Image (cartoon, grey):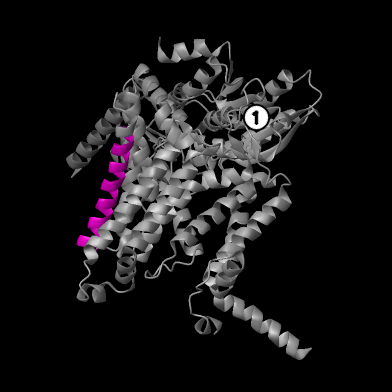
Amino acid sequence: MRSHKLFLSALLVLVLAFTSILFVAHAQDSSGAGLTIGFAQTGSESGWRTDFTNAMMSEAEAMGINLLFSDGQQKQENQIAALRSFIAQGVDAIILAPIVETGWDDVLQEAADAEIPVLIIDRGVTADPSLYITRVASDFVYEGRLAGAWLATATADRASCNVVELYGTVGSSPAIDRATGFADAIALFPQIQIIASQSGDFTRSGGKTVMESFLSSMDPSTICAVFAHNDDMLIGAIQAMEEAGITPAVDILTVSVDATNDELQMLIDGKANATVLLSPYMGGPAYQAIIDYLGGAELPPLIMVPSAMYFQDTAAAELANRTGG
Amino acid sequence: MLETKTAVEPTTAPTPFNLMQTLSRNRRFLFPVLALILILIGNRLISPTFFTIRVGPDGRLIGSLIDILNRGAPTVLLAIGMTLVIAAKGIDLSVGAVIAICGAVAAVLISTTTLPPLLVIAIAIGAGILCGLWNGILVALFDIQPIVATLILMVIGRGIAQLITEGQITTFSNESLEFVGTGLIGGFPFPIFLSVIVVALVWLLIRSTAIGMLIESVGANDRASFYAGIDATKIKLLVYIISGICAAITGLIITADIKGADANNAGLWKELDAILAVVIGGTALTGGRFYLIMSVVGALIIQSIQTGIYISGLPPTFNLIVQAVVILAILFLQSEDFRRLFTGAWAKLRRQS
């Protein structure tokens, strides 16, 4: 009986020692190399999204992280299924780029129960902040402000400037925040006014249709500038302007957000004036945050990725930098 | 009712007066046309320049009315195909996805190969025929419910289009292909001519042959049609193929218009616009009798509302609500029961006073 107890306690000590060794080894492991992270992407609905996915993958490779990638194809149920599969596989951490803000509570709780840290990237979620470690995102309001500030500088010598706004998808957070930031910035400059605002649904076709209807229903010479919530809508609007015999970037100034490769080409060709970068390089800060968290560090609730602007004279350098040529 | 007494066809030439008479005799035709006129007048009230058409630098006519015809062309084309499918007691949910597939095929072929543009256009339309054939086989040969059969292609089609474009917006620069979406003839955008040509061709097909009658017969009762010696399978295959061709032409227009294939967004939710156009035009979803030209009017109504919203200056957040309210009003106007409710209440009120 006694020998039994002795044996059991010895076993217990051994097991404890072993797990603590494992734990230490694991803690050392979290320098980055060898971590397995599951990444649930929304899908590939835009050129920017594809850039973002590629950036996530190349940054993971550079840091020696084993990234498990799941494409949600614009459906929340696919993303939830991906999260459950990551939990079942027992990954070290999960990165979620949510397609919508609501409905994540249950699956985030499952991850918390399995003690797998979840990091939210890009758009936000409404779930309890204790269910995820932090959110890495671009500041959409700041992007709108940058666009407004640029327009104010560019039109400083004009008595008035009437702006038409190509609004993103109604109700989406980038559209709401960019509109807010832009309105905040131009509110300081009474000569700048938004005379029309309509939704082009973040698509080229939508941007072209809306711009065309503006040019049909009002005198084009009264429009001073166009502010598009993303580059794709602006590229559509540029086509509409050209078809109506208006020289984009000269007759009507343009400013948009995203800085996609196609838009940089428009800047190089002199058909657009300025674009605000929606940084696709969020992977680095996200992976670093996970490594810090696993190392026991406290994280701020929101980590902002810095933004930048590109113009006709700086676009070529950035495009060359991206395409590696 | 009045209609039964005046069922005799007018033999005189259709003067404007006679046209009005025909319209008022057939309320089915009266209300969509009336709704279109009311919406156009409403748009004129919102924007004083609504009916103005100015000439652009390259002879292009610029104005909201031109926009409605040009932007309405995709919906008109889809509504034509959808009318025939619905008349044969079917439904085609896949047209939006077929638009994406055909646009992707055209854009990828023109940007990566040296095939002549006309051949590329033919291949893209061929892809549309294949899609239509696929739907038709599922519905006609395997007897799968049309809503489920076409849902399969609706879901998978956008995936196929993304595979073709490799998830990118495939841009191209080719004047011949761009002409399909942005070309001008006599100042009018080319899509307007395309939609008129397709309407005329389909109208000839159903009116100069027995096909229109056969479609209605299959839609009204396919078992009875079978015993009457009609090959319902062939008729069903035909209507889905026509719908596929219409979707392919639409895909070419949308892709050529922005000089790029946007697999995620091209034609998104367009199938619903097409079905709505058919319903506004008075064709019942239960199949049988169909009204091709009224579906065209329905499509123009939808586009007039859309253009009206663009120029209204309302915040974008109101778009969908305004659209829904106007369409609901049109459907109420068409509903005989709803009108009777009003005329009844009106008569009652007059009797009381």
Where residue A58 appears, as percent x and y from the top left, is 37, 20
Along the viewing direction, whichever of A13 and B5 lies nearer the viewer: B5
Looking at the rendering, in which quadrant would you find the C terminus of chain B?
A: bottom right
Looking at the rendering, in which quadrant would you find the N terminus of chain B?
A: bottom right
Along the viewing direction, whichever of B221 and B164 lies nearer the viewer: B221
Q: Which residue lies under the disc numbered 1?
A: A226
- Tell me where residue B248 sits by quadrant: top left
Q: Looking at the picture, does residue B13 appear above or below residue B177? A: below
Q: Chain of mark 1?
A: A
Residue A91 visible to the viewer: no
* Residue name at image x 46 percent, y 49 percent: B196
- For label 1, count other residues whose C-alpha is less than 10 Å away and answer few (under 14), some (14-19) or many (20+): many
Q: Looking at the picture, does residue A31 appear above or below residue A204? A: above
Where residue B3 appears, as percent x and y from the top left, is 52, 80
Magenta stretch, main secondary structure, is helix
In the image, taking residue A250 as reference, residue B284 lies left or right, namely left
Element marked by disc 1 = strand
Q: Looking at the picture, does residue A251 appear above or below residue A129? A: above
Count every numbered label the image shows and give the total.
Answer: 1
User: What residue span does the magenta drawing correspond to?
Assistant: B120-143
In the image, taking residue A15 as reference, residue A176 lies left or right, namely right
- Residue B133 within the segment the image draws in magenta: yes
Disc 1 residue type?
A: Val
* Residue name at image x 45 percent, y 11 percent: A320
In the image, taking residue B89 as reference, residue B26 lies left or right, namely right
Where residue B13 appears, as percent x and y from the top left, is 53, 67
